[in-house]
Amino acid sequence: MNENSCSFHNEKELRDGQVESVSAGCPPPCDEDNSALLAFRGISISELKNHGILQALTAEANGWEPAVMNTEVLRAQEEWEAVDSIQPETGSRASSDQPGQLISFSEALQHFQTVDLSSFKKRIQPTIRRTGLAALRHCLFGPPKLHQGLREERDLVLTIAQCGLDSQDPMHGRVLQTIYKKLTGSKFDCALHGDHWEDLGFQGTNPATDLRGAGFLALLHLLYLVMDSKTLLMAQEIFRLSRHHIQQFPFCLMSVNITRITIQALREECLSRECNRQQKVIPVVNSFYAAAFLRLAHVWRTQHKTISDSGFVLRDLEVLAKKSPRRLLKTLETYLAGVSKGQASLLGARKCAGPQAPPSKDLTFTGVCDLPPHSSEGTWLI
């Protein structure tokens, strides 16, 4: 409407169920007005807002105070007012106390240090119980016992492994969101259930179903891997390898299996010597997990392993990791030193090449829990 538009004074008159507009001093609405309205219908709501047309149509302007508002204008106004209140849909269970905010490993760990975990702690078995010759051999040739002052920290690790994923807990949701964003580069929240978790290497649409034997510790390990600037590079390289068109494997499921190996190594006291040396448990456990994942990726890439080899690769890794944890940790230290200098590639001299393939739902993955039991006793290397 321009300044030369005439003033209208409208009043309602109901005649035979229809509303008619009566104008003082101006002719009834004509075809030209109808064509203008049709033209507005083709303009986006944001454009109407930008040009002030909605305000002109819905507010007092130039002395015109509409008594009857066109239904099209009302609908447009309601849609525009709703724009600011629309939030990205993150799924029925993607609740968070701070939506979109990443969570650090230390913050997630602090959560478990402050909540009551007594019911979960009752379930843990801190060490392997040995009898007969196995107990004697372990006493004579096995690793030293963990220092008394470190046992509470060890028990916390094992207790977290007993905790499942609770989609109603905001902290749990933030851990999942952080892992997803760091691996994919996405800046948006995602649903806590959905096919996108299969893209990351879970077997189904709900990550909680794949944490058997590792519990929430498996997610904490992934969080540790992606939230450190040095290990993030390693995680991204392994993730790319997992999507190789020939050598693909389920990334997160493989990580869960490595967490299982880490738990067993801790319970069998394989890490006690290093924990005693550093006077810490959680940092040693995290480093051991990362070192084992590094070793697996190197073997997978250089020996051209495929998904059909997964069970055997994990079993060999478990044997090596338990027998020679210090050697494994040294490999990680060398890699991280190279990362800080911009020289390291965990996949050897040449990085993983070849087209990326979407994860196949027909992959048959064999984890450490699916293999026949074997003896883990042997000569300990330090």
Image (spheres, rainbow, N blue to C red):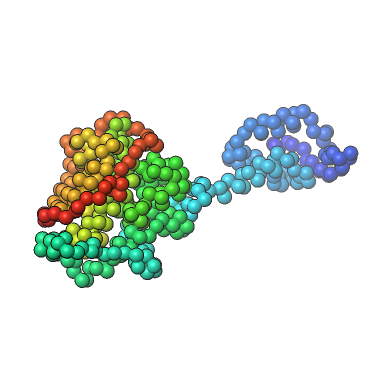
Viewer-closest of 2 and 10: 10
**Residue closest to the far front:** 132
Can you give x and y, in whole percent of width and height, for residue 18 in the image? 84, 39
Q: Is residue 315 left or right of residue 226?
A: left
* Depth order, front residue of 71/355: 355
Query: In percent of the image, x 75 and y 43: which residue is there?
Result: 69
Image coordinates for residue 226, horizontal then vertical, percent = 31, 49
Image quadrant of residue 157? bottom left
Place of residue 298 in the rendered image (x, y in percent of width and height, measured from the top left) = 20, 41
Q: Is residue 34 visible?
A: yes
Relative to 114, say whether 255 is above or below.
above
Q: Residue at 21% across / 60% down in the picture?
A: 268
Across and down, in percent, residue 176 comes to 40, 51
**Vertical side of 325 occupied by 34: above or below:** above
Side (left or right) of 107 relative to 338: right
Q: Quadrant of residue 313?
A: top left
Residue at the extreme right: 16
Q: In the image shown, does 185 or 93 lie closer to the viewer? A: 93
Camera-nearest residue between 350 and 144: 144
Give the residue drawn at x 35%, y 37%.
363
Kindly tell me whether residue 170 is visible in this rendering.
Answer: no
The residue positioned 16% from the left and 60% from the top of the image is: 134
Quadrant hosting residue 239: top left
Please give left or right for residue 103 compared with residue 371 in the image: right
For the C terminus, which image quadrant? bottom left
Count all numbered tags in the image, as a single digit: 0
Instruction: Pick the quarter of the image with the N terminus.
Output: top right
